[in-house]
Image (cartoon, coloured by chain):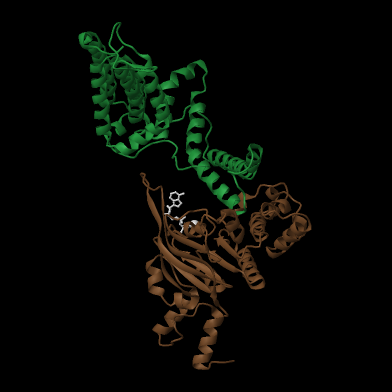
Amino acid sequence: MNFDVAFGQYCEGDSILHRLDPRAKIIMSLLYIVDVFLAKNVFAFALLTSFTVAMAVLSRIKPRILLRGLKPVIFIMIFTGVINVFWYRGAEGAKPLVDWWIFTIYPAGILNAVLIVLRVVLLIAGTSLILTYTTTPLALTDGLERLLSPLAKIKVPVHEFSLMMTIALRFIPTLIEETGKIMDAQKARGASFSEGSLVKRAKALIPVLVPLFASSFRRADELAVAMECRCYRGGKGRTRMNVLKATFKDFAGVIVIILLGVSLVLLNKYTDAFALGF
Amino acid sequence: MNLNTEKCAAEFRGVSFTYNKGIAYEKKAVRSVSLKIYGGCVTGLIGSTGSGKSTLIKMLNGLVKPDEGEVIVDGTNIWDKKVKIRDVRFKVGLVMQYPEYQLFDETVSEDIAFGPKNMGISGDELKRRVAEAAKFSGLDPDLLEKSPFDISGGQKRRAALAGVIAMTPSLLVLDEPAAGLDPAGRREILGRIKNYQRESGNSVVIVSHSMEDVAKYCDRLAVMNKGEIVLYDETDRVFSHGEELRDMGLDVPEITKVAEELARLGVDVGNDVYTVKYAAERLIEKYGLGK
Ligand SMILES: Nc1ncnc2c1ncn2[C@@H]1O[C@H](COP(=O)(O)OP(=O)(O)OP(=O)(O)O)[C@@H](O)[C@H]1O
Ligand SMILES: [Mg+2]
């Protein structure tokens, strides 16, 4: 098993994207997703791509790290790309580029495939740039809690949910590390996790899961005691240490993404004559 | 001291290891270390926090695969294609830091039996090994049928130690076996490890942060600093490098400090005394201050 995949992808930094209010960033990334689906033709995609590249430059996150984030979806990208190359014919009466055996490829098909793959890439790169790479998981839950706080009025336990999420986020890396340690310890006693039948492998996990559960319960206990000792008693009337304050730049950020969407719609509409895809 | 320097239990040949190679938090933990661990003695490994001790000893049983270099156990390279890494793990018994958190089985004795069972041992031989290992690590026989979650911390530590000793490894490696124990617990567990070494004739490697402990129980010492082995010699000779050790954030045993202070006052007993007994012998030998 490979535990090198760090949980959460936050990359430390001090760029403008890092400093935006998490609430603004959550809204921005939702709007950005809408924007990505608004783009319909080459020109709109060109604008969207340049915008996303500009964000990447602003964030000062290494391109290598950004590319690594795309790794898990590479298969989907190739699959949709290939399917589209063969399936899409474009306008009626278009001349095929290749027509050999069962393969017929139209120019529009290639373009379409490129745009669809590009859409997936932009979707992942853009949202991770706005949210996961530049926002700490804690800031994220904090922002989410504040955004959802109106729901508390209709008795949705927003604070409790957000506390659960914060605690979970805090302990996931610890659990991963602990799992690695326990697996090492059992391997040292000759346990083997990658040999034998499925049943045998499942059984081999018992020596890992039992200590892991035991220590999780112990940790939960200790945490509860520590919180009680400091008089924690739930959400009502709690003040915060870092109060989120939306400033001009946060509103500006949201507006920029809205403007991007508007420009995309306009580009779709007025560059229709050159439109090749869709 | 009858060091069997001919017999070599394990050897590192220019091993290096980097965590998270190629990504953001790259960390070079071990830098081209070459070291021979001799047979039939207790070798101590000391070094400040983060110097790479745990990483280095995990190479001995193949939990960490070096990026460069070779690890030789019993004369064979453990990463050779013909070698099964599991067999290496039966030869090199590794007790990790805070091993009490790895106990899982219903009873202490079954937990101790986990390692030997993995080796394919069963029946009377298994029972004999469990009983022997429990005795070696100082577990009361009536604890053996209890749940490992119902015994005290010190007892858990002993149970975990027994779980590795039951595999009768020819090289026993312990990562801070005495961490977090009270002084009596420390003495007891380290004494038992030393005893195990003497009675079985096998070799032992102990990682420790306590200079007093390594001075008392180790025949040879390796000092690690920033991923490299900077000193490797017999215990007394290592402790005669007081200045260097202090520069690395380490120290020398209290009695060595006394000796250094005495030397400053003109009573030279040598700066390599590391136990009170040894210091007393030196004083008597040098100044004849006998009874
Ligand atoms: N799983 C890991 N991932 C990334 N870096 C690690 C990992 N384990 C250790 N390191 C780093 O490698 C270096 C050496 O760690 P190691 O645990 O070997 O030190 P150590 O000498 O055993 O320290 P200590 O005395 O505190 O146990 C440290 O700087 C540590 O931060
Ligand atoms: Mg360590």
The x and y percentages for residue B38 are: 53, 72
The residue lying toward the viewer, choosing from B242 and B203, is B203
Quadrant hosting residue A121:
top left
Say which of B76 and A259 sits in front.
B76
State whether residue A118 is above or below residue B160. above
Q: Which chain is tinted green? A: A
Residue sticking out furthest to the bottom:
B288
Left or right: residue A246 compared with residue B227: left
Residue occupying the far top of the picture: A92
Kindly identify the residue that appears in the image at 26 percent across and 19 percent down. Answer: A45
- x, y percentage for residue A117? 34, 23
Where is residue B163 drawn, in percent x and y?
66, 56
Vertical position of residue A181 compared to residue B212: above or below: above
Q: Pinpoint residue A23: horizontal percent, then vertical percent.
A: 36, 25
Q: Residue B257: tell me if it is visible.
A: no
Q: Number of marks in the image?
A: 0
Quadrant the N terminus of chain B occupies? bottom right
Tell me: residue B26, above or below residue A36.
below
Q: Residue at x 50, y 77 (%)?
A: B274
Query: Which residue sits at x=36%, y=30%?
Result: A128
- In which quarter of the view is residue B240 placed? bottom left
Output the letter for the chain in brown: B
- Identify the image quadrant of the C terminus of chain B: bottom right
Please identify the quarter of the rendering in which residue A262 is found.
top left
- Residue A20 in sight in this render: yes
- Give the residue at x 54% y 85%: B280
B6 to the left or right of B257: right
Q: Which one is nearer the viewer's eye here, A59 or A123?
A: A123
